[in-house]
Amino acid sequence: SLLKSVSIALKAVPSKTTMPILECILMDATTNQIKFTTNDMELGIETIVDGTILEKGIVAIDAKIFSDIIRKLPDNDVTIETDGNLTTTITCEKAKFSISGQSGEEFSYLPYVERDNHIVVSQFTLKEVIRQTIFSIAANENNKLMTGELFEMKENILKVVSLDGHRIAIRKIELKDNYPSRKVVVPGKTLNEISKILSGEVEDQVKIFFTDNHIVFDDTVVVSRLIEGEYFRIDQMLSSDYETKVKINKREFLDCIDRATLFVKEGDKKPIIITIDDTGMQLNINSQMGSMNEEIDIDKEGKDIMIGFNPKFLIDALKVIDDEEISIYLVNPKAPCFIKNEEESYIYLILPVNFNTAR
């Protein structure tokens, strides 16, 4: 129980900071609960640990050392006590460690967030939605908004959007109740950590509270700052026009692209070239190491087309779609392609890559 709480709390300990106190885990036993708090000023986590308080108090302990000690202790009851100098003694069976603590008073507490506006969603669903969109956020900070995901509530629909300039991922889920309209941009880092903390059980619910600046996930309390700014107007990018529609077996398509990437070195910009005509779909990749051609059966509506893609972007999207058969909508070799289902509960937009038609 102690190890689990410490491992969760560790996720909000900064690796580099100008405030050494933030490298600590705050152990607060001043009330009737034992609470562990960590805070890197963007993300804060508070977990409650089962245990007995023999004497109330509060202390901040170096998080890394503390977690290393707890991880290596025998699997038995642990006693933690501090003296007047904040020296903290950790005892378990015959093992005894002493480390110096710091005053809990200096620790940056988590911001108090009004718990008025919230939605309720199953932990399983939230975890899935993060998995199905998080790969499309931008890794670098050139545009802060791209490092987060848009959470948009409208009546009983939660829409989650991520984009990085080359592609867009959208997931829509139905909530049990209707909620007031709201849009917030949640940092990708927060969502990654939340996804690791969630149990992922269908029956377990998580409450998500919003204010103008913060989001709180309630269960283990995770408070995160939101990213400020107006998110991109993606509706303008989502056209429903298409010239070519293809239905294809997802597994076959994914395996084929996967085989094609055998010839692509890390960081290589080689596109996979897809030709769609009445005979089916041909996939072709050429690199210095060799070439590959493969054909797949498809259901095709509309025009023939030849188009190039970064294979990684296709693989990322296909990996997280659970449908056996998928529909791909194409307009022309320079326009984005869409992979989406009829209900549009998921939409993946991928920009094509220019390629030289000379084979």
Image: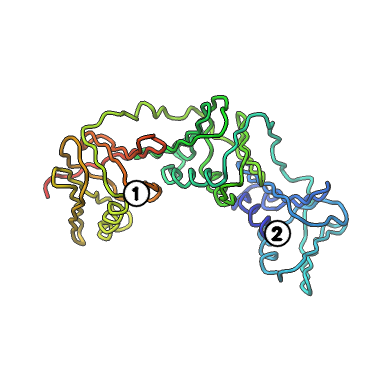
Work out whether residue 322 or residue 317 is closer to the camera in this orientation and state it: 322
Amino acid tagged 2: Ser
How is colour applied across the structure in the image?
rainbow
Q: What label does residue 41 carry, if any? A: none
Along the horizontal axis of the image, is 285 left or right of 29?
Answer: left
Which residue lies at the image location 71% right of the left edge and 53% below the top edge?
Answer: 25
Amino acid tagged 1: Glu
Q: Quadrant where the N terminus lies?
A: bottom right
Disc 2 packing (10 Å; few <14; some 14–19; many ≥20): few
Q: Secondary structure at mark 1?
A: loop
Along the horizontal axis of the image, is 329 left or right of 101?
Answer: left
Along the horizontal axis of the image, is 271 left or right of 340?
Answer: left
Instruction: Check disc 1 and report the residue beneath it.
Output: 324
Compared with residue 276, is residue 288 higher up or lower down, i.e. above or below? below
Which residue lies at the image location 24% right of the left edge and 41% below the top edge?
Answer: 246
Compared with residue 115, is residue 43 higher up or lower down, i.e. above or below? below
Work out whether residue 249 or residue 114 is closer to the camera in this orientation and state it: 249
List x then y, in percent, for residue 157: 50, 31
Compared with residue 161, is residue 311 higher up or lower down, i.e. above or below? below
Disc 1 packing (10 Å; few <14; some 14–19; many ≥20): few
Which residue lies at the image location 75% right of the left edge and 49% below the top edge?
Answer: 35
Instruction: Check disc 2 and report the residue beneath it.
Output: 1
Q: Quadrant of residue 5?
A: bottom right
Q: Secondary structure at mark 2?
A: loop
List x then y, in percent, for residue 117: 63, 29
Could you tell which of marks 2 and 1 lies nearer the N-terminus? 2
Frontmost of labels 2 and 1 is 1
List x then y, in percent, for residue 44: 65, 44
